[in-house]
Amino acid sequence: MSGSSCPRRLSLALQGGGSFGAFTWGVLDALLSEGVEIAAVTGTSAGAVNAVLLAHGYATAPEPVARPAAARAALDAFWTRCGRAALASPTATPPALMATPVLRVAMVAQAAVTDAVQALAAPAQRDPLGLLGGVADYLFDPIDFAAIRTSCGPEGVLPLRIAATRLRDANAVLFDGPEIDRARVMASACLPTLFPPVEVDGETYWDGGFSANPPLMPFAEGFGTDEVLLVNLNPREIADPPHSAHDIAERMSSVAFQQAMLSEVARLEAADDGEGGKLRRIRLHRIEGGDTLVGYGLDAKLNAHPAFLAELKRLGREAALEWLADDNYR
């Protein structure tokens, strides 16, 4: 299922991870700038946001040759807006605390504030980042969802699918390009410790990371290409056990999200072993961001300070360029 050489044309599967999605921003920036042709994309949570931004660029570019630049610009603009919104947040990390090792202390303090807000609020009132109000308008209004719905179907310029978890039965629900709107993106990124469930067409949803992080099986079923790059934001291992209530909650979420990814990989491996019937074999490539990002602490997923996002983008870009070089792409 794994490959050793990078194809010029591949599909992407983008994992969720809060602000760690800025690492994926860097990965995408490198792939687009290096001329990799992206055939299709799936995503969950922050990965769904990045997938939608990629689709926005492809759908709104005036001509095919302009698609990579348009996608890079859309990604840059969104993550810049995230950083600006974070600076206005009462839980923002002051710039003076951004340098390590003080960063870790700042993350713990920020997490404590968030925990306090959650403890005092009913579930329907939880929205410490303001994403259900004006901030959501600021972040998502520039995205041309109509263009995405028109142009990013199965035969479109960039086939797109994002995952959310249906609350009543815990099943993954995949939304295709022709039905993508802001509500579905927010459903994919609805972490229940931060936000109330998101309702779409009478169903309520939580973060897609609980059920498909990210969706991989569509590629075995004929979606996109059989060459797939998975951008993983969760660490493969965390040596130290959690002790505080906050750390335990963070680890529980991380375990659930990673298990959802491992389950998808196991299904692909079963298909490779001949158990999948008509499923096609997939060559799965990986860029592992989690092993680097875990050093910031899992609670850093809530830190959207511009300097931190820029650092994550740099790390993602470097990881992608290294992957391209190691896979003899050039």
Image (cartoon, helix red, strand yellow):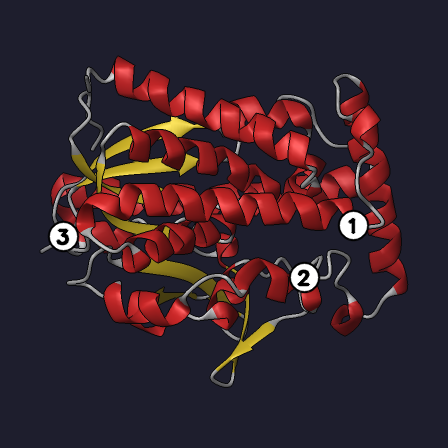
Residue 74, above or below 181 = above
Q: Quadrant of the C terminus?
A: top left
Horizontal side of residue 138 vs 62, given as left or right: right
- As drawn, the residue found furthest toward the bottom would be 202
Query: Residue 150: x, y in percent?
Result: 27, 71
Query: Residue 166: x, y in percent?
Result: 49, 70
Q: Mark 1 highlights which residue?
A: 88
**Foreground of the two, 271 or 25:** 25
Q: Are marks 2 and 1 in contact (CB under 8 Å)?
A: no
- Residue 279 has which mark? 3
**Foreground of the two, 104 or 217:** 104
Callout 2: helix, strand or loop? helix
Horizontal side of residue 266 vs 9, given as left or right: right
First in sequence, mark 2 or 1: give its number. Answer: 1
Question: Which residue is at 23% across, 33% downward?
Answer: 36
Query: What is the quadrant of residue 284 in the picture?
Result: top left
Q: Gap in Å between the C-alphas at discs 2 and 3?
A: 42 Å
Which three-letter amino acid code belongs to the residue tagged 3?
Leu
Q: Are marks 2 and 3 in contact (CB under 8 Å)?
A: no
Query: Disc 2 vs disc 3: which is toward the camera?
Result: 2
